[in-house]
Image (cartoon, rainbow, N blue to C red):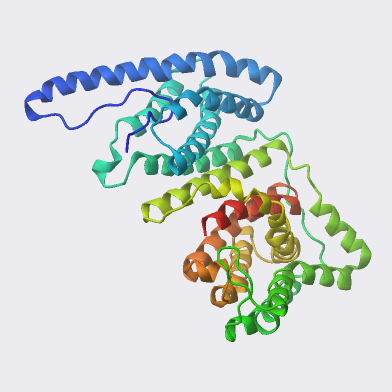
């Protein structure tokens, strides 16, 4: 497979020089490094960070200026996408990983610029290092797989770095202070909710279907069971949110329900959180597709388009049917006793265990695709930490958790 020009550079160092030509290869390699430094890093940074960034920051803050510049910088490379040599699913992975890398790198370079306001040299060095890490390293020679895999891994690293930089920089003009729930919302209420949710799932809705191998309905195969079994499957999926709504009404009355409703439609998260939500999903999707490909599994990228009709229903089946319970009811109460990390792991554990019967139910995507539960458990516990971070930093907006769950559900289910 042809290697594309990676990231922001267009020059690639050829490998495999014969021993007799080693001296010439060193000279040529040094020349290409200098050309790469001048043509890519220096040639671009004089414009992006030297000219555009200061002027954007006169109008916008560093965060919004980074986003605007990152998007422009990203789409400036569009011709390289078309000349990359990739097609189909490979091209989709390449564009997703490329976009996440470039936009995340922009935030990092803005931060470096703020620390060295009178010099472009650190920015040029960082830009050049980014190019070199992808252009001068032949990933196949290191046993790491094709360069596409390296780019995907790099995208994740830069996204995490950008999040850390943004969090520590104080760029946000809004102080997202964690809202402490009322003292009446005790941790015991959270434990009761989590226990009841598992009990209803195991003994009323999903457990019997799994135990007696009763088919329901599948989104990935032609399996279709009796209507009553399909009803149990669908209603069981709403247990976390329905139970949370009932318990809120029971303990807090109509006023508690109104407060819960306002948190669901709390759409004003701040543009930064919308951006990071989309970037996280893009990076996760690219990573999953890459891993899927490296494992030798086939995937038809056309499914992303033809199944767009299921995008809106997925808002209800998963995000709305679960998040009112996991983040809307349990998480806040757990955080009255435990810190955010411990609370996240508790929610993540029960979140995964609640899904366990689906792995034994004929027709479900988990059963039909043979997804190992232990991997699913670890993934949900890790995701729970991310959900909590987003939820706490958006003033406990349930919409932030619903949005992340919704966006992630679409590419995930398209891959099963």
Position of residue 61 in the picture relative to residue 264 (left or right): left
The residue lying toward the viewer, choosing from 15 and 43, is: 15
Q: How many marks?
A: 0
Quadrant housing the N terminus:
top left
Residue 27 shows in the view? yes
Q: Residue at x 52, y 48 (%)?
A: 285
- What percent of the width, then of the height, locates residue 29? 23, 22
- What percent of the width, then of the height, locates residue 406? 67, 53
Q: Is residue 258 above or below residue 145?
A: below
Q: Residue at x 49, y 45 (%)?
A: 286
Q: Quadrant of residue 250?
A: bottom right
Q: Is residue 278 above or below residue 405?
A: above
Q: Is residue 82 above or below residue 221?
A: above
Residue 396 shows in the view? no
- What percent of the width, then of the height, locates residue 101? 49, 35
Residue that extends furthest to the left in the rendered view of this protein: 20
The residue lying toward the viewer, choosing from 56 and 335, is: 56
Position of residue 149 in the picture relative to residue 382 (left or right): left
Residue that extends furthest to the right in the rendered view of this protein: 254
Q: Is residue 392 above or below residue 35?
A: below
- What percent of the width, then of the height, locates residue 170? 64, 35
Q: Quadrant of residue 223?
A: bottom right
Q: Residue at x 63, y 81 (%)?
A: 209
């Amino acid at each position: 497979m042809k290697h594309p020009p990676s990231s922001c550079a267009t020059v690639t160092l050829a490998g495999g020089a014969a021993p007799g030509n080693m001296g010439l290869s060193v000279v040529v390699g040094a020349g290409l490094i200098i050309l790469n430094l001048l043509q890519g890093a220096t040639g671009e940074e004089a414009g992006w960070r030297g000219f555009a960034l200061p002027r954007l920051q006169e109008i916008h803050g560093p965060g919004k200026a980074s986003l605007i510049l990152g998007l422009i910088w990203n789409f400036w490379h569009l011709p390289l996408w078309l000349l990359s040599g990739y097609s189909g699913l490979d091209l989709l992975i390449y564009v997703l990983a490329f976009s996440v890398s470039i936009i995340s790198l922009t935030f990092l370079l803005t931060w470096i610029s703020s620390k060295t306001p009178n010099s472009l040299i650190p920015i040029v060095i960082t830009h050049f290092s980014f190019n070199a890490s992808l252009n001068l390293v032949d990933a196949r020679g290191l046993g790491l797989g094709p360069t596409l895999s390296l780019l995907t891994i790099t995208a994740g690293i830069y996204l995490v770095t950008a999040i850390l930089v943004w969090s520590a920089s104080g760029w946000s003009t809004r102080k997202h202070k964690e809202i402490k729930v009322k003292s009446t919302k005790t941790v015991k209420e959270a434990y009761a909710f989590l226990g009841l949710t598992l009990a209803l799932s195991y003994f009323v809705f999903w457990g019997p279907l799994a135990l007696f191998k009763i088919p329901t309905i599948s989104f990935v195969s032609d399996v279709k069971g009796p209507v009553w079994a399909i009803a149990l499957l669908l209603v069981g999926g709403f247990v976390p949110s329905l139970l949370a709504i009932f318990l809120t009404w029971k303990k807090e009355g109509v006023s508690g329900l109104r407060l819960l409703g306002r948190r669901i439609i709390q759409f004003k998260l701040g543009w930064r959180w919308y951006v990071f939500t989309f970037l996280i999903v893009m990076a996760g999707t690219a990573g999953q597709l890459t891993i899927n490909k490296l494992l030798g599994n086939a995937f038809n990228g056309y499914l992303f388009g033809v199944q767009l009709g299921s995008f809106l229903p997925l808002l209800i089946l998963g995000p709305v049917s679960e998040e009112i319970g996991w983040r809307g009811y349990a998480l806040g109460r757990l955080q009255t006793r435990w810190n955010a990390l411990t609370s996240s792991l508790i929610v993540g554990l029960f979140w995964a265990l609640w899904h366990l019967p689906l792995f034994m139910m004929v027709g479900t995507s988990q059963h039909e695709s043979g997804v190992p539960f232990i991997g699913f458990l670890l993934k949900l516990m890790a995701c729970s930490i991310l959900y909590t971070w987003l939820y706490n930093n958006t003033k406990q907006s349930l919409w932030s958790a619903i949005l992340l769950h919704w966006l992630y559900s679409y590419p995930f289910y398209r891959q099963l």
